[in-house]
Image (tube, grey):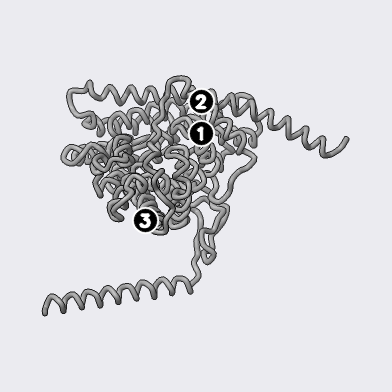
Amino acid sequence: MNKHVVEQTVIFFSVSKWLFLSSAVGIMIGGLMSVFLNILSTAEQTRSLLPFPFYFTLPFALMLTTWIVRTFDQNATGHGTEKVIEAVHKRDGYINAKVIPVKLVATVLTIFSGGSVGKEGPGAQIGAGAASFVATLLKFSKSDRKKLVICGISAGFASVFGTPIAGAIFGIEVLIIGVIMYDVLLPSFIAGFAAFTTAQFLGVTYHYYDINMYRAFNLDFGLIGQVVMAGVFFGIVSDLFITAVNKIETGIRTIPYNRYLKAFVAGLVMVIISYFLSESYLGLGLGTIRDALSPSTLISDNVHWYDFILKTIFTAITLGSGGSGGIITPVFYVGATSGVVFGHLTGDHIALFAALGFVSVLAGTTNSPIASIIMAVELFGVHMANYAALSVVIAFLITGHRSVFQSQKLALNKADNITIGKGNDLDDTSISIDMKDIDKVKRLRNRLRYKRLRWQVKNAKDDFE
């Protein structure tokens, strides 16, 4: 028989197999996500029944989630996407099914009480856990189980955020920096679309943003320059977010006190700050994100310049002290609010830069530029594509070889003169830089210091005269 015919026949049956499997898994995960999102929504609505501010429960909730996770499944701690990436790379996608109810309960408790976490981590972990359970039940091979779990990740993201294409790409792009796993591309798309459609059918609603504010923008050089600067700014914000979250989480965990006492004190600190300053840093923070993305400056002016800094701190404290949830929603918050700050600095297009921050900080903190660009189009409209592509890629590069997901594997040099250990986890990767480049940076820094000193001396003379 002709080899070409055999090849096409084998491919046809493989495609048919994964069309069925990814569709079935996507529908199942869409159903699970609708249950999770509805429980979460109901929990947030019941806050108003409390005779005191809901966030007064935060210290006790953090103690309770710490106990739940420690007692039933420690893989449910922190932000779930990290655990899923680790499972794909180190255990061929095997995830214990008991993580699903544990993660759901711990996340709902954390968000209900005001813990600063997101919902994508549970979405990814519940989706991947369900896919792993199905693969184990049907006795799939390790490679097929891994493939199905990646479909579960994509389905979880797609159904949580309402972005089926970006969710599918994110599920495969977030695993290895610089590599797209094309063999999982079709199943991931199908699983993402099936989960998104199922969740919508079961009553889940998604929020998309007004694109009319972008229609009037012309691709002029002034705006392009601002977008380039915005990309650099969002790359720096991403780097600061990664550093702050890692340092604060590590710092809390190394404090030599009882974990339940640390959880209570951490919650109490956030309660005090929220009581005297603002509640906007608690929970998902979707209201603040919507304000930042509003085309009306009267609404976006509600966002303060320090909001993204405090949200970063609250997120790190919550995750480091026993809270359970995702990290992407806080990333959206930080990106959108820092975009408002940049918009005020440039004096115009505040909603545009908030939207660019939304996706650019996602790309910078998670090393997912393609998914971030597609998400910009899905959430904000096709008119965002040119601006988003420029800002997102710059932010992705500026952040360097770092991520909020330390289990990501590295397969890409972000600069020619940097040598990295490819194929390792980010936390195990060695990075070396050419001494000539180090010397150039030192000379540039000294030159800037000299110019600053001259400027200070000149100002001092002018003041004296």
Q: Tag 3 or tag 1, which sits nearer the N-term?
A: 1
Residue 164 shows which numbered tag? Answer: 1
Residue 11 x %, y %: 73, 35
Give the quarter of the image for residue 440.
bottom left
> Disc 3 marks which amino acid?
Phe
According to the picture, the residue beneath numbered tag 3 turns out to be 233
Residue at point 63%, 42% (across, down) = 182
Q: Looking at this view, name the residue that lies furthest to the right.
A: 1
> Disc 1 marks which amino acid?
Pro
Residue 73 x %, y %: 44, 31
Q: Which secondary structure, mark 1?
A: helix
How many residues crowd mark 1 within 10 Å: few (<14), some (14–19), many (20+)?
many
Residue at point 36%, 72% (across, down) = 445
| Mark 3 and mark 2: Cα distance apart in space | 36 Å
Give the quarter of the image for residue 332.
top left
Residue 201 x %, y %: 48, 20
Q: Quadrant of the N terminus?
A: top right
The answer to whether residue 51 shows anywhere in this view is: yes
Pointer 2 with pointer 1, Cβ within 8 A: yes
* In the rendered image, the vertical position of residue 220 relative to residue 122, given as above or below: below
Residue at point 46%, 27% (across, down) = 100
Residue 197 shows which numbered tag? Answer: 2
Please indicate whether residue 153 sits to the left or right of residue 18 in the image: left
Q: Tag 1 or tag 2, which sits nearer the N-term?
A: 1
Give the quarter of the image for residue 285.
top left
The one of 217 and 288 positioned closer to us in this rendering: 217
Q: Quadrant of the C terminus?
A: bottom left
